[in-house]
Image (tube, rainbow, N blue to C red):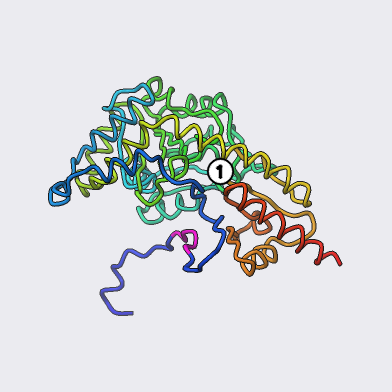
Amino acid sequence: MASWEENVRKAVPYTPGEQPKIANIIKLNTNENPYPPSPAVLKALRGTDVEYLRRYPDPKSFDLTEAFARLNGISPDRVFAGVGSDDVLAMSFLTFFNSDRPVLFPDITYSFYDVWADLFRIPYRTVPLDENFRIVKEDYYGENGGIVIANPNAPTGIAMKQSDLRDIIDRNRDVVVIVDEAYIDFGGESLLGLTAEYENLLVVQTLSKSRALAGMRIGFAAGSEKLIRYLNDVKYSFNSYTMNDSAIRAGAAALDDREYFEYTRGRIIATRERSKKEMEKLGFIVTDSRSNFLFVRHKEAAARDIFHALRQAGIIVRYFDKPRIDNYLRITVGTDEQMDTLFAFLASWLKKEKA
């Protein structure tokens, strides 16, 4: 090892979902919205003067944060915008977790949390979910340096009741509690309304899933004015211009088009509920997902074998080779046509496997 390498900050990186360069596939592995963004987004982008491209964007992203605040009935001073919820979460880890006590999050959850903790040298401890993949609120009552909970959780899709989350916050008022609501628009109770009550609660959301803007990278944090000021202080010490002007315009337009959002969200939820029943008919055990994906295992066939068989058929899903979930698949809810193709292939393949 060269001498300079001894001082390199080394990390085990997060592994993002595959973006395969294969034609004519059914891509159900990264929880993208199967429907296009609101027509208002395209109109906002087409209707802009290219003059804005030579100028720095608004560092406060005011049009974007104001649209989010207006939608949710809160002050823009209580909203922070970033380059997707990943950027918002990473900035939050860096800002709020700065003690010798371990930050707590579940052992099965969004796998970026431990990556950020390692990168920023934040002590942490993973808390096991119970045998039904549910968070046990009492496990978060002890001393800690902060708490992070995804609700609904990923990759399980299971949502916690607001009363249980409130209980965790009540017992941890001396640390920042982050609730990651990337999938909240598909089910569960948002804690946005509680951010006025709890000074230490930070709620993170994204436009990647329910607004079909994963390619634009737009995320938010909502919390007390004090939390948001601290976040902005760190942001302006790192990179003042995180949000580009196109993203600001597109995000504001998407947030303002409530009718289109409700229409596409409703379609995804309806397809999800139908898909649960179809998968159960095929012999799968399905968690009660409140997200835009299914988390499933088959009673007889191995998840790894199903994953490879689907891939050979041009259907891409997510497989996690990790303890406790290595016999599960995460399947994004696609269009009805895409899901019917999935069901037909599984029915045929499982029949052949039994023969």
Residue 140 visible in the picture = yes
Query: Extreme right residue here?
Result: 355
| First to last magenta residue range | 14-19
Dominant secondary structure of the residues highlighted in magenta in the image: loop
228 left or right of 259 in image:
left
Q: Within the image, what quadrant is residue 317 found in?
A: bottom right
- Against 300, residue 333 (above or below) is above
Q: Is residue 352 above or below residue 232?
A: below
Residue at image location 30% in from the left, 73% down from the top: 5
Residue 115 screen position, x and y as percent: 43, 55
**Crowding at mark 1 (Cα within 10 Å: few <14, some 14-19, many 20+):** many
Which residue bears the numbered disc 1? 292
Q: Residue at x 59, y 32 (%)?
A: 138
Residue 17 colored in magenta in the image: yes
In the structure shown, which secondary structural element does the residue marked by tag 1 occupy? Answer: loop
Q: Residue shown at 33%/79% (left/top)?
A: 1
Residue nearest the viewer, comparing 236 with 20:
20
The residue positioned farthest toward the bottom in the image shown: 1
Q: Nearer the viewer, residue 195 or 68?
A: 68
- In the rendered image, which quarter is residue 26 located in? bottom right
Quarter of the rendering occupied by the C terminus = bottom right
Image coordinates for residue 243, horizontal then vertical, percent: 26, 46
Seen from the viewer's position, the closer of residues 8 and 156 is 156
Task: Determine whether, in the image, residue 103 is placed left or right of residue 244.
Answer: right
Q: Amino acid at mark 1?
A: Asn
Residue at screen point 27% across, 40% down: 249
